Image (spheres, rainbow, N blue to C red):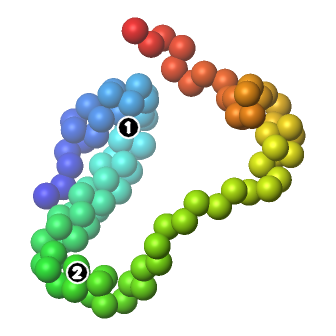
């Protein structure tokens, strides 16, 4: 189940990308391989995977630990407010 160049062009439009014909052809091939691989993974028996994961996983309980140098890290950040690191806004056109 591969993708067509038209579908890749549609995806590129959704991502606001302009692709050259060569890029469109390359991404069509690459994305088709990804889609086919995902289809293979989805076809695996979930029960077998769960059993294998349970047999190989050694889980430990979660525990909260306070990092003693957290304040020093925040002070090194270029922007901070109330003991938190601030970063520039990514989406400025929110509704």
Q: Residue, x 41% and y 43% (percent of image)?
A: 22
Residue 68, horizontal then vertical, whole percent? 80, 56
Spatial separation of the CA atoms under disc 1 and disc 2 = 40 Å
Q: Number of labelled discs? A: 2
Q: Residue, x 74% and y 25% (percent of image)?
A: 81
Q: In front: mark 1 or mark 2?
A: 2
Q: Is residue 2 above or below residue 11?
A: below
How packed mark 2 is, by other alpha carbons closer than 10 Å (few <14, some 14-19, many 20 or more), is few
Query: Is label 1 in contact with label 2 (beta carbons under 8 Å)?
Result: no
State the residue in front, 43 or 37: 43
Q: Earlier in the sequence, mark 1 or mark 2?
A: 1
Q: Residue, x 42% and y 85% (percent of image)?
A: 58
State the residue in front, 37 or 19: 37
Q: Is residue 94 above or below residue 56?
A: above
Residue 90, horizontal then vertical, whole percent? 56, 24
Residue 18 is left or right of residue 35, and the answer is right
Residue 63 visible in the picture: yes
How packed mark 1 is, by other alpha carbons closer than 10 Å (few <14, some 14-19, many 20 or more), is few
User: Residue beneath label 2, please?
Assistant: 49
State the residue in front, 51 or 40: 51
State the residue in front, 20 or 66: 66
Residue 16 is left or right of residue 71, and the answer is left
Residue 17, horizontal then vertical, whole percent? 43, 29
User: Residue beneath label 1, please?
Assistant: 21
Numbered label attached to residue 34 = none
| Location of the C terminus (image quadrant) | top left
Question: What element does badge 2 sit on?
Answer: helix
Q: Is residue 15 above or below residue 5?
A: above
| Location of the N terminus (image quadrant) | bottom left
Question: What element does badge 1 sit on?
Answer: helix
Q: Residue, x 22% and y 71% (percent of image)?
A: 41
């Amino acid at each position: 189940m591969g993708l067509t160049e038209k579908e890749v062009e549609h995806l590129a439009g959704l991502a606001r990308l302009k692709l050259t014909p060569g890029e469109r052809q390359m991404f069509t091939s690459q994305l088709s391989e990804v889609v086919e691989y995902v289809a293979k993974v989805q076809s695996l028996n979930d029960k077998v995977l769960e059993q294998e994961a349970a047999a190989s996983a050694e889980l430990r309980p979660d525990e909260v630990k306070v990092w003693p140098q957290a304040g020093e890290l925040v002070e090194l950040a270029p922007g901070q407010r109330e003991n938190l690191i601030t970063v520039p806004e990514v989406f400025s056109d929110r509704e």
